[in-house]
Amino acid sequence: MDPFEDTLRRLREAFATGRTQPAKFRATQLRGLSRFLQDNKQLLLDALAQDLRKSDFESEVSEIAISQAEVTLALKNLRAWMKNERVPKNLATQLDSAFIRKEPFGLVLIIAPWNYPLNLTLVPLVGALAAGNCVVLKPSEISNSVEKVLAEVLPRYLDQSCFAVVLGGPQETGQLLEHKFDYIFFTGSPRVGRIVMTAAAKHLTPVTLELGGKNPCYIDDNCDPQTVANRVAWFRYFNAGQTCVAPDYILCSPETQERLLPALQSAITRFYGDDPQSSPNLGRIINQKHFQRLQALLGCGRIAIGGQSDESERYIAPTVLVDVQATELVMQEEIFGPILPILNVQSLDEAIDFITQREKPLALYAFSNSSQVVKRVLARTSSGGFCGNDGFMHMTLTSLPFGGVAGASGMGRYHGKFSFDTFSHHRACLLRSPRMEKVNDLRYPPHTPRNLRVLLVAMEARCCSCTLL
Ligand code: NAD
Protein backbone atom coordinates (compact mmCIF):
# COMPACT_ATOMS: atom_id res chain seq x y z
CA MET A 1 0.00 0.00 0.00
CA ASP A 2 1.54 3.29 -1.13
CA PRO A 3 0.66 6.10 1.31
CA PHE A 4 1.36 8.86 -1.23
CA GLU A 5 -0.41 7.58 -4.33
CA ASP A 6 -3.82 9.18 -3.74
CA THR A 7 -2.36 12.57 -2.78
CA LEU A 8 -0.08 12.69 -5.79
CA ARG A 9 -2.86 11.62 -8.16
CA ARG A 10 -5.15 14.33 -6.75
CA LEU A 11 -2.50 17.01 -7.26
CA ARG A 12 -1.67 15.84 -10.77
CA GLU A 13 -5.33 15.91 -11.73
CA ALA A 14 -5.66 19.44 -10.33
CA PHE A 15 -2.64 20.61 -12.29
CA ALA A 16 -4.03 19.11 -15.49
CA THR A 17 -7.15 21.27 -15.18
CA GLY A 18 -4.95 24.36 -15.55
CA ARG A 19 -6.36 26.02 -12.44
CA THR A 20 -2.97 26.91 -10.99
CA GLN A 21 -2.00 28.87 -14.10
CA PRO A 22 -3.88 32.21 -13.84
CA ALA A 23 -2.10 35.00 -11.98
CA LYS A 24 -5.18 35.46 -9.81
CA PHE A 25 -4.99 31.89 -8.49
CA ARG A 26 -1.27 32.20 -7.77
CA ALA A 27 -1.76 35.53 -5.99
CA THR A 28 -4.52 34.00 -3.85
CA GLN A 29 -2.13 31.26 -2.73
CA LEU A 30 0.59 33.78 -1.93
CA ARG A 31 -1.83 35.90 0.06
CA GLY A 32 -2.85 32.74 1.93
CA LEU A 33 0.79 32.13 2.78
CA SER A 34 1.11 35.68 4.04
CA ARG A 35 -1.98 35.29 6.24
CA PHE A 36 -0.59 32.01 7.57
CA LEU A 37 2.53 33.86 8.74
CA GLN A 38 0.58 36.72 10.27
CA ASP A 39 -2.21 34.74 11.96
CA ASN A 40 0.12 32.13 13.42
CA LYS A 41 3.14 34.17 14.37
CA GLN A 42 3.07 33.26 18.06
CA LEU A 43 2.42 29.60 17.27
CA LEU A 44 5.43 29.60 14.96
CA LEU A 45 7.68 31.41 17.44
CA ASP A 46 6.71 28.87 20.10
CA ALA A 47 7.36 25.94 17.77
CA LEU A 48 10.79 27.31 16.79
CA ALA A 49 11.64 27.81 20.46
CA GLN A 50 10.50 24.28 21.18
CA ASP A 51 12.62 22.73 18.44
CA LEU A 52 15.80 24.80 18.60
CA ARG A 53 15.29 27.13 21.57
CA LYS A 54 15.52 29.92 19.04
CA SER A 55 15.05 33.37 20.54
CA ASP A 56 12.10 35.39 19.23
CA PHE A 57 14.60 37.83 17.72
CA GLU A 58 16.37 35.11 15.70
CA SER A 59 13.07 33.51 14.69
CA GLU A 60 11.56 36.79 13.55
CA VAL A 61 14.63 37.85 11.61
CA SER A 62 15.70 34.59 10.01
CA GLU A 63 12.44 32.68 9.65
CA ILE A 64 9.30 34.82 9.65
CA ALA A 65 10.45 38.17 8.23
CA ILE A 66 12.49 36.52 5.45
CA SER A 67 9.56 34.34 4.41
CA GLN A 68 7.17 37.31 4.54
CA ALA A 69 9.55 39.47 2.47
CA GLU A 70 9.65 36.78 -0.22
CA VAL A 71 5.84 36.58 -0.33
CA THR A 72 5.54 40.37 -0.56
CA LEU A 73 8.13 40.57 -3.34
CA ALA A 74 6.45 37.78 -5.32
CA LEU A 75 3.01 39.37 -4.97
CA LYS A 76 4.35 42.73 -6.12
CA ASN A 77 6.13 41.32 -9.16
CA LEU A 78 4.04 38.30 -10.06
CA ARG A 79 2.50 39.66 -13.26
CA ALA A 80 5.81 41.10 -14.48
CA TRP A 81 7.62 37.80 -13.80
CA MET A 82 4.91 35.84 -15.59
CA LYS A 83 5.03 37.98 -18.72
CA ASN A 84 6.36 36.44 -21.90
CA GLU A 85 9.87 37.71 -22.59
CA ARG A 86 10.33 39.00 -26.11
CA VAL A 87 13.70 38.04 -27.61
CA PRO A 88 15.71 39.42 -30.56
CA LYS A 89 15.07 37.79 -33.93
CA ASN A 90 17.09 37.07 -37.04
CA LEU A 91 16.32 37.97 -40.63
CA ALA A 92 14.40 34.79 -41.32
CA THR A 93 12.00 35.38 -38.42
CA GLN A 94 11.50 39.12 -38.66
CA LEU A 95 7.76 38.74 -39.24
CA ASP A 96 7.29 36.16 -36.51
CA SER A 97 6.83 36.32 -32.80
CA ALA A 98 9.70 34.96 -30.66
CA PHE A 99 9.45 34.84 -26.90
CA ILE A 100 10.18 32.89 -23.72
CA ARG A 101 7.09 31.69 -21.93
CA LYS A 102 7.41 30.91 -18.21
CA GLU A 103 5.45 27.77 -17.52
CA PRO A 104 5.01 25.80 -14.31
CA PHE A 105 6.72 22.40 -14.29
CA GLY A 106 3.65 20.68 -12.85
CA LEU A 107 3.98 18.65 -9.67
CA VAL A 108 6.88 19.86 -7.56
CA LEU A 109 8.40 18.23 -4.48
CA ILE A 110 10.08 20.40 -1.84
CA ILE A 111 12.11 18.61 0.84
CA ALA A 112 13.33 20.74 3.75
CA PRO A 113 15.84 20.40 6.62
CA TRP A 114 15.43 21.21 10.32
CA ASN A 115 17.81 24.10 10.97
CA TYR A 116 15.62 26.90 9.61
CA PRO A 117 12.52 24.75 9.40
CA LEU A 118 10.15 27.53 8.40
CA ASN A 119 12.35 29.65 6.13
CA LEU A 120 13.73 26.69 4.18
CA THR A 121 10.24 25.31 3.62
CA LEU A 122 8.32 28.49 2.87
CA VAL A 123 10.85 30.43 0.78
CA PRO A 124 11.04 27.71 -1.90
CA LEU A 125 7.26 27.30 -1.59
CA VAL A 126 6.78 30.97 -2.52
CA GLY A 127 8.68 30.39 -5.77
CA ALA A 128 6.85 27.17 -6.55
CA LEU A 129 3.38 28.71 -5.99
CA ALA A 130 4.24 31.95 -7.80
CA ALA A 131 5.33 29.86 -10.78
CA GLY A 132 1.94 28.08 -10.81
CA ASN A 133 2.93 24.58 -9.71
CA CYS A 134 1.14 22.05 -7.56
CA VAL A 135 3.32 21.35 -4.54
CA VAL A 136 4.11 18.51 -2.19
CA LEU A 137 5.93 19.82 0.86
CA LYS A 138 8.03 17.46 2.98
CA PRO A 139 9.24 19.28 6.11
CA SER A 140 11.92 17.81 8.34
CA GLU A 141 10.66 15.29 10.87
CA ILE A 142 13.48 16.36 13.20
CA SER A 143 12.12 19.87 13.87
CA ASN A 144 8.83 18.23 14.77
CA SER A 145 7.05 21.18 16.42
CA VAL A 146 7.36 23.27 13.25
CA GLU A 147 6.55 20.18 11.17
CA LYS A 148 3.29 19.82 13.12
CA VAL A 149 2.26 23.45 12.50
CA LEU A 150 3.08 23.13 8.80
CA ALA A 151 1.09 19.92 8.50
CA GLU A 152 -1.93 20.94 10.55
CA VAL A 153 -2.29 24.67 9.96
CA LEU A 154 -0.65 25.69 6.66
CA PRO A 155 -2.97 23.65 4.36
CA ARG A 156 -5.95 25.62 5.68
CA TYR A 157 -4.52 28.72 4.01
CA LEU A 158 -3.87 27.15 0.62
CA ASP A 159 -5.93 25.41 -2.04
CA GLN A 160 -5.79 21.82 -0.87
CA SER A 161 -6.48 20.37 -4.28
CA CYS A 162 -3.11 21.78 -5.40
CA PHE A 163 -1.02 21.60 -2.26
CA ALA A 164 -0.17 18.92 0.29
CA VAL A 165 2.15 18.48 3.24
CA VAL A 166 3.46 14.94 3.63
CA LEU A 167 5.25 13.67 6.70
CA GLY A 168 8.03 11.20 7.22
CA GLY A 169 11.68 10.47 7.88
CA PRO A 170 14.28 8.83 5.65
CA GLN A 171 12.25 5.69 4.93
CA GLU A 172 9.03 7.49 3.98
CA THR A 173 10.90 10.15 2.00
CA GLY A 174 12.70 7.37 0.13
CA GLN A 175 9.31 5.90 -0.76
CA LEU A 176 8.03 9.33 -1.81
CA LEU A 177 11.06 9.79 -4.07
CA GLU A 178 10.19 6.65 -6.00
CA HIS A 179 7.34 8.63 -7.55
CA LYS A 180 7.80 10.78 -10.59
CA PHE A 181 7.81 14.52 -9.92
CA ASP A 182 8.27 17.29 -12.47
CA TYR A 183 10.79 19.10 -10.29
CA ILE A 184 12.51 18.34 -6.99
CA PHE A 185 13.84 21.08 -4.74
CA PHE A 186 15.94 19.66 -1.91
CA THR A 187 17.67 21.42 0.97
CA GLY A 188 19.80 19.28 3.26
CA SER A 189 23.04 17.40 3.57
CA PRO A 190 25.29 16.36 0.67
CA ARG A 191 24.76 12.72 1.73
CA VAL A 192 20.99 12.87 1.30
CA GLY A 193 21.45 15.16 -1.72
CA ARG A 194 23.07 12.18 -3.48
CA ILE A 195 20.09 9.98 -2.58
CA VAL A 196 17.68 12.59 -3.96
CA MET A 197 19.66 13.05 -7.15
CA THR A 198 19.87 9.30 -7.71
CA ALA A 199 16.10 8.98 -7.27
CA ALA A 200 15.52 11.93 -9.61
CA ALA A 201 17.84 10.40 -12.22
CA LYS A 202 15.54 7.40 -12.49
CA HIS A 203 12.84 9.68 -13.92
CA LEU A 204 15.25 12.28 -15.36
CA THR A 205 13.62 14.84 -13.10
CA PRO A 206 15.38 18.22 -12.82
CA VAL A 207 16.61 19.09 -9.34
CA THR A 208 17.84 21.95 -7.25
CA LEU A 209 20.11 20.79 -4.45
CA GLU A 210 20.76 23.30 -1.69
CA LEU A 211 23.47 21.56 0.29
CA GLY A 212 26.14 22.51 2.78
CA GLY A 213 29.85 22.44 3.16
CA LYS A 214 32.71 24.00 5.03
CA ASN A 215 32.68 27.76 4.56
CA PRO A 216 36.14 29.34 4.93
CA CYS A 217 36.60 32.72 6.55
CA TYR A 218 39.87 34.49 5.80
CA ILE A 219 40.95 37.26 8.17
CA ASP A 220 43.71 39.57 7.01
CA ASP A 221 46.29 41.13 9.36
CA ASN A 222 45.04 44.53 8.24
CA CYS A 223 41.76 44.58 10.15
CA ASP A 224 40.13 45.88 13.30
CA PRO A 225 40.01 42.72 15.46
CA GLN A 226 36.99 43.77 17.53
CA THR A 227 34.85 44.63 14.51
CA VAL A 228 35.79 41.34 12.86
CA ALA A 229 35.24 39.38 16.09
CA ASN A 230 31.76 40.91 16.58
CA ARG A 231 30.71 40.00 13.07
CA VAL A 232 32.27 36.53 13.05
CA ALA A 233 30.91 35.61 16.51
CA TRP A 234 27.45 36.83 15.61
CA PHE A 235 27.10 34.73 12.52
CA ARG A 236 28.98 31.70 13.86
CA TYR A 237 26.83 31.40 17.00
CA PHE A 238 23.52 32.48 15.44
CA ASN A 239 21.10 29.53 15.72
CA ALA A 240 23.80 27.81 17.82
CA GLY A 241 25.95 27.55 14.72
CA GLN A 242 23.43 25.39 12.86
CA THR A 243 23.51 27.49 9.70
CA CYS A 244 24.58 26.23 6.29
CA VAL A 245 26.26 29.55 5.44
CA ALA A 246 27.98 30.08 8.80
CA PRO A 247 31.79 30.42 8.68
CA ASP A 248 33.06 26.94 9.34
CA TYR A 249 36.66 27.85 10.11
CA ILE A 250 38.96 30.86 10.24
CA LEU A 251 42.23 31.17 8.34
CA CYS A 252 44.59 33.85 9.67
CA SER A 253 48.18 34.44 10.71
CA PRO A 254 49.32 33.51 14.26
CA GLU A 255 49.65 37.27 15.01
CA THR A 256 46.06 37.99 13.98
CA GLN A 257 44.89 34.98 15.99
CA GLU A 258 46.50 36.49 19.11
CA ARG A 259 44.65 39.79 18.55
CA LEU A 260 41.42 38.04 17.63
CA LEU A 261 41.08 35.73 20.65
CA PRO A 262 40.47 38.42 23.31
CA ALA A 263 38.19 40.23 20.86
CA LEU A 264 36.17 37.02 20.27
CA GLN A 265 35.95 36.44 24.03
CA SER A 266 34.74 39.99 24.49
CA ALA A 267 32.11 39.62 21.72
CA ILE A 268 30.85 36.32 23.18
CA THR A 269 30.56 37.82 26.68
CA ARG A 270 28.81 40.91 25.31
CA PHE A 271 26.31 38.80 23.33
CA TYR A 272 25.64 35.96 25.78
CA GLY A 273 26.93 37.16 29.20
CA ASP A 274 29.45 35.48 31.52
CA ASP A 275 27.33 32.32 31.55
CA PRO A 276 26.11 31.72 27.98
CA GLN A 277 24.09 28.71 29.15
CA SER A 278 21.68 31.05 30.93
CA SER A 279 21.43 33.45 27.99
CA PRO A 280 18.00 33.54 26.33
CA ASN A 281 19.77 34.47 23.10
CA LEU A 282 21.72 31.26 22.50
CA GLY A 283 19.98 28.34 20.82
CA ARG A 284 20.39 24.64 21.52
CA ILE A 285 21.56 21.69 19.45
CA ILE A 286 18.64 20.09 17.64
CA ASN A 287 18.98 16.55 19.04
CA GLN A 288 21.12 14.08 20.95
CA LYS A 289 22.74 12.66 17.84
CA HIS A 290 24.04 16.04 16.71
CA PHE A 291 25.02 16.92 20.30
CA GLN A 292 27.21 13.83 20.51
CA ARG A 293 28.69 14.45 17.09
CA LEU A 294 29.66 17.98 18.18
CA GLN A 295 31.05 16.84 21.49
CA ALA A 296 33.50 14.64 19.62
CA LEU A 297 34.68 17.71 17.70
CA LEU A 298 35.51 19.52 20.96
CA GLY A 299 38.44 17.13 21.32
CA CYS A 300 40.21 18.61 18.29
CA GLY A 301 43.03 21.13 18.67
CA ARG A 302 43.01 23.11 21.92
CA ILE A 303 40.03 24.93 23.42
CA ALA A 304 40.82 28.64 23.63
CA ILE A 305 37.31 29.86 24.48
CA GLY A 306 34.24 27.99 25.77
CA GLY A 307 34.19 24.22 25.41
CA GLN A 308 31.58 23.59 28.14
CA SER A 309 28.57 21.44 27.38
CA ASP A 310 25.48 20.07 29.11
CA GLU A 311 23.87 17.01 27.56
CA SER A 312 20.61 17.38 29.52
CA GLU A 313 19.95 20.69 27.67
CA ARG A 314 21.89 19.87 24.51
CA TYR A 315 23.91 22.98 25.31
CA ILE A 316 27.31 23.65 23.83
CA ALA A 317 29.04 26.90 24.76
CA PRO A 318 30.26 29.25 22.03
CA THR A 319 33.66 27.71 21.45
CA VAL A 320 36.88 28.66 19.69
CA LEU A 321 39.52 26.00 18.94
CA VAL A 322 43.16 26.80 18.17
CA ASP A 323 46.18 24.67 17.17
CA VAL A 324 43.87 22.74 14.87
CA GLN A 325 45.39 20.55 12.17
CA ALA A 326 43.77 20.24 8.77
CA THR A 327 43.74 16.46 9.23
CA GLU A 328 41.61 16.53 12.40
CA LEU A 329 37.96 15.49 12.48
CA VAL A 330 36.70 19.04 12.93
CA MET A 331 38.19 19.88 9.52
CA GLN A 332 36.83 16.78 7.80
CA GLU A 333 33.11 17.49 8.10
CA GLU A 334 30.76 20.46 8.16
CA ILE A 335 30.67 21.53 11.83
CA PHE A 336 27.06 22.76 12.04
CA GLY A 337 27.36 23.84 15.68
CA PRO A 338 28.80 26.64 17.87
CA ILE A 339 32.42 25.60 17.38
CA LEU A 340 34.91 27.76 15.49
CA PRO A 341 38.37 26.37 14.68
CA ILE A 342 41.20 28.75 13.77
CA LEU A 343 43.90 27.51 11.42
CA ASN A 344 47.07 29.47 10.89
CA VAL A 345 48.40 30.47 7.49
CA GLN A 346 51.48 32.57 6.79
CA SER A 347 50.12 34.51 3.81
CA LEU A 348 47.09 35.34 1.72
CA ASP A 349 48.36 33.01 -1.00
CA GLU A 350 48.61 30.13 1.46
CA ALA A 351 45.01 30.81 2.54
CA ILE A 352 43.83 30.86 -1.07
CA ASP A 353 45.65 27.58 -1.78
CA PHE A 354 44.07 26.03 1.31
CA ILE A 355 40.61 27.05 0.11
CA THR A 356 41.02 26.05 -3.52
CA GLN A 357 42.45 22.61 -2.68
CA ARG A 358 39.13 21.70 -1.04
CA GLU A 359 35.52 21.30 -2.18
CA LYS A 360 33.97 24.51 -3.41
CA PRO A 361 32.06 25.95 -0.44
CA LEU A 362 28.51 27.29 -0.25
CA ALA A 363 29.79 30.61 1.09
CA LEU A 364 33.16 32.27 1.49
CA TYR A 365 34.14 35.23 3.66
CA ALA A 366 37.12 37.57 3.65
CA PHE A 367 37.80 40.32 6.18
CA SER A 368 40.29 43.09 5.52
CA ASN A 369 40.55 46.87 5.64
CA SER A 370 42.13 46.55 2.22
CA SER A 371 39.60 46.15 -0.56
CA GLN A 372 42.44 44.76 -2.69
CA VAL A 373 42.77 41.78 -0.37
CA VAL A 374 39.02 41.11 -0.35
CA LYS A 375 38.89 41.36 -4.14
CA ARG A 376 41.90 39.04 -4.49
CA VAL A 377 40.16 36.34 -2.44
CA LEU A 378 37.03 36.84 -4.52
CA ALA A 379 38.91 36.62 -7.82
CA ARG A 380 41.01 33.56 -6.99
CA THR A 381 38.39 31.33 -5.41
CA SER A 382 34.98 29.89 -6.24
CA SER A 383 31.96 29.49 -3.95
CA GLY A 384 28.16 29.61 -4.05
CA GLY A 385 28.15 33.10 -2.52
CA PHE A 386 30.69 35.58 -1.20
CA CYS A 387 30.60 38.32 1.40
CA GLY A 388 33.46 40.70 2.13
CA ASN A 389 33.78 42.03 5.68
CA ASP A 390 30.72 40.34 7.06
CA GLY A 391 28.88 37.07 7.50
CA PHE A 392 25.86 35.79 5.68
CA MET A 393 24.46 39.23 4.85
CA HIS A 394 24.66 38.47 1.12
CA MET A 395 21.81 36.02 1.49
CA THR A 396 19.48 38.64 2.94
CA LEU A 397 19.27 40.34 -0.46
CA THR A 398 16.48 38.90 -2.60
CA SER A 399 18.20 40.51 -5.58
CA LEU A 400 21.07 38.02 -5.25
CA PRO A 401 20.78 34.34 -6.17
CA PHE A 402 21.32 31.88 -3.33
CA GLY A 403 22.78 28.44 -3.94
CA GLY A 404 25.87 26.33 -4.32
CA VAL A 405 28.39 25.83 -7.06
CA ALA A 406 28.31 22.07 -7.65
CA GLY A 407 29.71 19.33 -5.41
CA ALA A 408 28.92 19.44 -1.69
CA SER A 409 27.66 23.03 -1.94
CA GLY A 410 24.83 21.93 -4.24
CA MET A 411 23.44 23.21 -7.53
CA GLY A 412 20.76 25.65 -8.64
CA ARG A 413 19.67 28.94 -7.13
CA TYR A 414 16.66 30.65 -5.60
CA HIS A 415 15.39 33.70 -3.63
CA GLY A 416 13.33 36.48 -5.17
CA LYS A 417 12.90 36.23 -8.92
CA PHE A 418 15.49 33.45 -9.02
CA SER A 419 12.96 31.26 -7.18
CA PHE A 420 10.26 32.02 -9.72
CA ASP A 421 12.67 31.20 -12.55
CA THR A 422 13.84 28.00 -10.86
CA PHE A 423 10.28 26.70 -10.61
CA SER A 424 9.36 27.78 -14.16
CA HIS A 425 10.20 26.05 -17.38
CA HIS A 426 11.48 28.68 -19.80
CA ARG A 427 9.73 27.52 -22.93
CA ALA A 428 11.24 28.67 -26.20
CA CYS A 429 8.40 29.81 -28.46
CA LEU A 430 8.34 30.94 -32.03
CA LEU A 431 5.02 31.69 -33.68
CA ARG A 432 5.68 31.79 -37.40
CA SER A 433 3.61 33.44 -40.04
CA PRO A 434 1.79 31.00 -42.33
CA ARG A 435 2.49 33.43 -45.16
CA MET A 436 5.71 34.45 -46.96
CA GLU A 437 6.51 30.87 -47.98
CA LYS A 438 8.77 32.25 -50.70
CA VAL A 439 11.35 33.18 -48.01
CA ASN A 440 11.52 29.58 -46.84
CA ASP A 441 12.35 28.31 -50.31
CA LEU A 442 15.97 29.13 -49.56
CA ARG A 443 16.32 26.28 -47.10
CA TYR A 444 14.59 23.55 -49.08
CA PRO A 445 16.49 21.10 -51.29
CA PRO A 446 17.67 21.00 -53.95
CA HIS A 447 20.37 23.18 -52.37
CA THR A 448 22.27 25.72 -54.41
CA PRO A 449 25.44 27.71 -53.69
CA ARG A 450 23.40 30.93 -53.93
CA ASN A 451 20.88 29.85 -51.33
CA LEU A 452 23.70 28.82 -49.01
CA ARG A 453 25.35 32.25 -49.44
CA VAL A 454 22.11 34.03 -48.53
CA LEU A 455 21.58 31.82 -45.50
CA LEU A 456 25.12 32.43 -44.29
CA VAL A 457 24.60 36.18 -44.54
CA ALA A 458 21.50 35.84 -42.42
CA MET A 459 23.50 33.74 -39.92
CA GLU A 460 25.90 36.61 -39.39
CA ALA A 461 23.06 38.22 -37.49
CA ARG A 462 24.16 35.90 -34.63
CA CYS A 463 26.49 38.65 -33.43
CA CYS A 464 23.45 40.65 -32.28
CA SER A 465 22.30 37.60 -30.27
CA CYS A 466 20.16 36.19 -33.07
CA THR A 467 20.07 32.57 -34.07
CA LEU A 468 19.06 31.20 -37.39
CA LEU A 469 16.61 28.36 -37.98
P1 NAD B 1 19.30 15.92 5.90
O1 NAD B 1 19.91 15.80 4.56
O2 NAD B 1 19.59 14.89 6.92
O3 NAD B 1 17.69 15.98 5.78
C1 NAD B 1 17.05 16.84 4.89
C2 NAD B 1 15.70 16.25 4.49
O4 NAD B 1 15.93 15.00 3.85
C3 NAD B 1 14.76 16.00 5.65
O5 NAD B 1 13.45 16.40 5.28
C4 NAD B 1 14.83 14.51 5.86
O6 NAD B 1 13.62 13.94 6.30
C5 NAD B 1 15.16 13.98 4.49
N1 NAD B 1 15.98 12.76 4.53
C6 NAD B 1 16.88 12.40 5.48
N2 NAD B 1 17.44 11.21 5.18
C7 NAD B 1 16.88 10.80 4.02
C8 NAD B 1 17.03 9.65 3.20
N3 NAD B 1 17.88 8.67 3.53
N4 NAD B 1 16.28 9.56 2.09
C9 NAD B 1 15.45 10.55 1.73
N5 NAD B 1 15.25 11.65 2.48
C10 NAD B 1 15.96 11.80 3.60
O7 NAD B 1 19.71 17.38 6.41
P2 NAD B 1 19.42 18.03 7.80
O8 NAD B 1 20.21 17.32 8.85
O9 NAD B 1 17.95 18.18 7.99
O10 NAD B 1 20.02 19.50 7.57
C11 NAD B 1 21.37 19.80 7.72
C12 NAD B 1 22.09 19.84 6.39
O11 NAD B 1 21.40 20.69 5.50
C13 NAD B 1 23.48 20.42 6.50
O12 NAD B 1 24.35 19.70 5.69
C14 NAD B 1 23.32 21.85 5.98
O13 NAD B 1 24.49 22.43 5.48
C15 NAD B 1 22.29 21.64 4.93
N6 NAD B 1 21.58 22.87 4.70
C16 NAD B 1 21.76 23.51 3.52
C17 NAD B 1 21.11 24.72 3.30
C18 NAD B 1 21.27 25.47 2.01
O14 NAD B 1 20.47 26.36 1.77
N7 NAD B 1 22.24 25.17 1.19
C19 NAD B 1 20.29 25.24 4.28
C20 NAD B 1 20.14 24.54 5.46
C21 NAD B 1 20.78 23.35 5.66
Image (cartoon, rainbow, N blue to C red):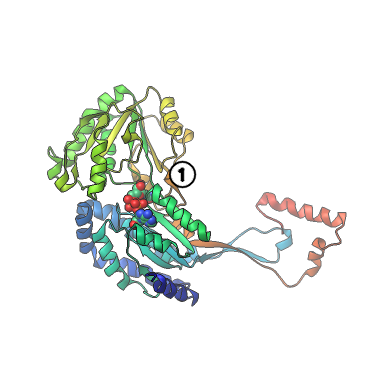
Residue at 32% from the left image edge and 42% from the top image edge: 246
Along the line of sight, which residue is nearer the eye, 290 or 134? Answer: 290
Tell me the quadrant of the picture where the C terminus can be found: bottom right
Q: Secondary structure at mark 1?
A: helix
Q: Number of numbered discs present? A: 1
Percent of width and height locating residue 238: 26, 45
Residue bearing mark 1: 407
Tell me the quadrant of the picture where the N terminus can be found: bottom left
Along the line of sight, which residue is nearer the eye, 277 or 74? Answer: 277
Along the line of sight, which residue is nearer the eye, 4 or 406? Answer: 4
- From the viewer's perspective, is residue 173 above or below residue 286? below
Along the line of sight, which residue is nearer the eye, 76 or 312? Answer: 312
Residue found at the very far front of the displayed protein? 1
- From the viewer's perspective, is residue 255 above or below residue 33? above
Residue at 51% from the left image edge and 59% from the top image edge: 202
Q: Amino acid at mark 1?
A: Gly
Percent of width and height locating residue 208: 45, 54
Q: Would you say 149 lies left or right of 360 here?
A: left
Q: Can residue 364 be seen?
A: yes
